[in-house]
Image (cartoon, rainbow, N blue to C red):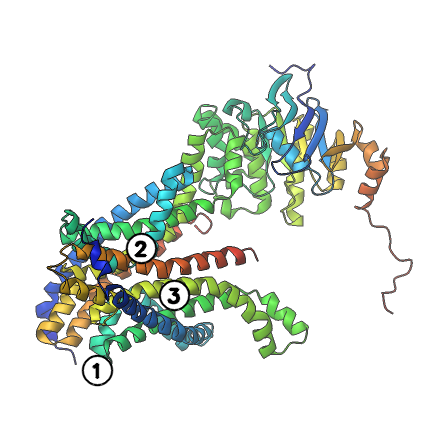
Amino acid sequence: MTDMQQPSLRVAHLVKQYANADKPVLNDISFEVPHGKVFVIVGPSGSGKSTLLRTIAGLEPIQGGTISLNGEVIETGRPGTESAGRSKRSSALRTRVGMVFQSYDLFPNKTVLGNITLAPTLVQKRDKTEVEKEAVALLERVGLVDRKDSWPHELSGGQRQRVAICRALILHPEVLLFDEVTAALDPEMVREVLDVMLELADQGQTMLIVTHEMQFARAIADQVILLEDGGIVEQSDDAERFFTHPRTERARQFLRTFEFDRHRASGDAIGQ
Amino acid sequence: MLDWTFITHYAPFFVRGSEMTLFISAFGIILAIAVGLVCAGVEIARIPVLRQIVRVYIELSRNTPLLVQLYFLYFGLPKLGVVWSAEQCAIVGLGFLGGSYMAEAMRGGLETIPNVQRESAYVLGFNTWQTLSRVVIPQAVSTSIPGIVANVIFLIKESSVVSAIALADVMYMAKDLIGMYYSTYESLFMLVVAYLIILLPISLFGTWLERRFDYERR
Amino acid sequence: MNGAEILLQPGVFPRLLQGLWVTVWIAGVSVALSVPVGLIVGWLMTMRNPVIRLLTRVYLDFIRIMPQLALLFIAFYGFARAWNWNLDATGACVFVFVLWGGAELGDLVRGALESISNAQYESAYVLGLGPWQTFTRVILPQALRRLLPASVNLATRIVKTTSLAVLLGVVEVIKVGQQIIDANRFQYPTGTLWIYGVIFFMYFIVCWPLSIVARRLEKRWSHD
């Protein structure tokens, strides 16, 4: 079913405009995510990174351009949908794009296993025992198999995010979206989530990641775009090169904000 | 200090009064929950005209006393040819008063569910009905329970007012005994005990229920 | 609709308004007296002394679990006899409403005081403010914001509960209405409907603005 000639995800001339806003939040965005590659979006806050992921997931309708999955157009921009709710795409289509959110979004009324098995049994009508076996295998991979009967509130933030990743993976999405999944986590829990994502990258899962963790972005990315004010400032097929030798001055400036040079030559304190 | 022979002799009166209190309250609460469900549904679904009607009803019901509502139903309505028994008036009155409180509790419970819950369900491919039945309603039940239990207790307490339209509830018994025998302390003592016996278990059950359904604390 | 003319009879409306004034007066005095009682009760509830904690807890729970009408009966018939108080019906109403309002407000005060984070006290301390300065300049203004909407709500509830005063024989709006109905029984047989209808809307006109104010305050102050 997957055609390797086609990019896994293609976004072309995407426009996102909210009602009552004078300019679009996303303006003429185009990029392609090849199969099995990791695509990272960076940019200052308010640049439209999260909105871009949300349009791809269908949470926000688009007003221009197209979004395609394996050569099949799944979303076409239509003006006049500025204040409409979510996109009208079908259930089956939605299961092909997975998403993990920043806030821990597990269903509090389901156990860990219940959270993971709900969608495949309910939406994909898969066999319950088969689904449970796969869920356990997934939990094994993220190191949480012993917590399968726990309730979400009994887990730490990092554990919840790992379960959320399993919940998305069990639907076998063609693309997996990550929206700043570590931004709300305590620093020591960030690592366990990022490790899971690195492992997924090694296994060839196609991913689109929005993150503030530049070190991590550099470690995981195959391709990068820098987004600002709803437009692409720099796009690079060579992530390592983007982080070491960005082409644009803006990208250089952006990356520099994450670095701290030794501020003072000697160790004396201010005011002494 | 208290005349125990009087108390043992007249305790059965309070048992009968409690039965009346519970009878009126139970039906009033059921009616209130039904009215609340309908109103909350109308408000959430944003059904045009009905929504405005529900708003007007909620404001009227919350900003007027039950006693006046009862007097209107019991003494006023017959002049329009609508003759209801005292029991019917009491139940309808409690339902009219409680419906708005229940609707607000249910709507409040629904509004506390973060939007990301619905978005997760959407991304996982759930349709509207699956999202409602598997994600939204189970959580809304748990988040509205504290409000609903508080309203149940509130309505049982409010039911004491039905004594004013000659229904022989706990309150009525106390008033009657004070009037007939001037045994004030004994009557008031039995009044307090009767309400404690009715309301304390419900209050404790409510606390337990709240814990049981609180996904964060369980 | 015939019978509505009863409302246009000379004296009917002014008398009803006088009755409403009694209602509003009882409620107003009760609310005004509840505020200091509530502040003291709330302050007592935040104390660590176990005896005070237990006593305030029992007081709050008893007041909350008893129907207001039962409390009115206890005050009117019970206390009056026990302590030989010459407590008239109006006095009994105000007494009960202050006890009730004080308990409810006290719990709100406790909640408001406890909801203010320790960091506020610590910041004030580090900045060199004294305990009284900390309380009046830092804690109280924040507590009041949380307190005010709920207090207005409580005032609405007290106004509504004032209707029970008629059952103790206070001549307030409902009693006045009943007198008018009785006096015009033969001339206007359907007067009952109209008089109770008018009383219903009189309560609504008093309570509704209070509810709106409470909601506005809640909305405006819920963000910070």
> Which residue is outermost to the right?
A265
CA separation in Å, label 2 and label 1? 35 Å
Q: Give whichever of C129, A256 is nearer the camera.
A: C129
Please say if A115 is above or below A267: above
Give residue C193's quadrant in the image.
bottom left
Mark toward the start of the polypeptide (1 vs 3): 1
The residue mark sitting in front, 2 or 1, is 1
Q: Position of residue A23 (x, y in %)?
A: 69, 36
Q: What element carries label 1?
A: helix
Local crowd size for mark 3, using a 10 Å CA cut-off: few (<14), some (14–19), many (≥20):
many
Name the mark on residue C82.
Answer: 1
Please say if C159 is above or below A50: below
Local crowd size for mark 1, using a 10 Å CA cut-off: few (<14), some (14–19), many (≥20):
few
Q: Position of residue A210 (x, y in %)?
A: 68, 36
CA separation in Å, label 1 and label 3? 30 Å
User: Residue at point 53% right, 46% down?
Assistant: A155
Q: In this view, does C7 lie to the left or right of C153?
A: left
Q: Give whichever of A38, B86 is nearer the camera.
A: B86
The amino acid type found where label 3 is placed reads Ala
> What residue would you read off at disc 3?
C155
Name the mark on residue B23.
Answer: none
> Which residue is outermost to the bottom?
C84
Instruction: Give me the chain letter of mark 1.
Output: C
> What residue would you read off at disc 2?
B205
Q: Position of residue C57 (x, y in %)?
A: 37, 70
Badge 1 vs badge 3, beta-carbon distance below 8 Å = no
From where the camera sits, is residue C94 visible? yes
